Amino acid sequence: MKTTELKIEGMTCASCVRRVENALSQVRGVSEANVNFATERASVTHGVDIDADSLSKAVSAAGYSAKPLH
Ligand code: 9UX
């Protein structure tokens, strides 16, 4: 498994975490997404290389923004 870390912006309550996790989980190839509200970081686990842009787009569609950290 590979992991992509993202910085999430726009979360204003703890429930936003679930919304972002759901959005990321629905991207093709993603097996798990965990978001930390306090650090505003998302950790996305996937089996194959995944386009960070597709993750950012999914987060944007949910009303937040994401930037790849590395
Ligand atoms: Mo509550 Mo977080 O509506 O968007 S889930 S602020």
Image: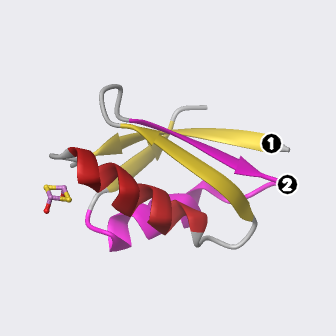
* 19 lies left or right of 46: left
Kindly check if marks 1 and 2 are in contact, taking CB atoms under 8 A apart as contact: yes
Q: Secondary structure at mark 2?
A: loop
Amino acid found under the numbered disc labelled 2: Gly
User: Residue 18, relative to residue 6: is it above or below?
Assistant: below
Mark 1 packing: few (<14 Cα in 10 Å), some, or many (20+)?
few
Q: Position of residue 20 (x, y in %)?
A: 40, 58
Q: Position of residue 61 (x, y in %)?
A: 35, 73
Cβ(mark 2) to ligand 1 < 8 Å? no
Q: Secondary structure at mark 1?
A: strand
Quadrant of the image where one finds ligand 1: bottom left
Identified at 46% across, 67% down, the residue is 23
Camera-side residue of 53 and 22: 22
Q: Quadrant of the N terminus?
A: top right
Which residue is the extreme one toward the top?
39
Q: Which residue is mark 1?
A: 2
Magenta span contains residue 62: yes
Identified at 46% across, 69% down, the residue is 58
Identified at 47% across, 65% down, the residue is 22
Q: Which residues are magenta?
A: 41-63
Q: Which mark is residue 47?
A: 2
Magenta span contains residue 25: no
Q: Position of residue 29 (x, y in %)?
A: 75, 66
The picture quadrant where one finds residue 63 is: bottom left
Visual colour scheme: secondary structure
Q: Position of residue 19 (x, y in %)?
A: 36, 62
Q: Quadrant of the C terminus?
A: top right
Mark 2 packing: few (<14 Cα in 10 Å), some, or many (20+)?
few
Amino acid found under the numbered disc labelled 1: Lys
How far apart are labels 1 and 2 at the CA level? 6 Å
User: Residue 3, relative to residue 70: is it above or below?
Assistant: below
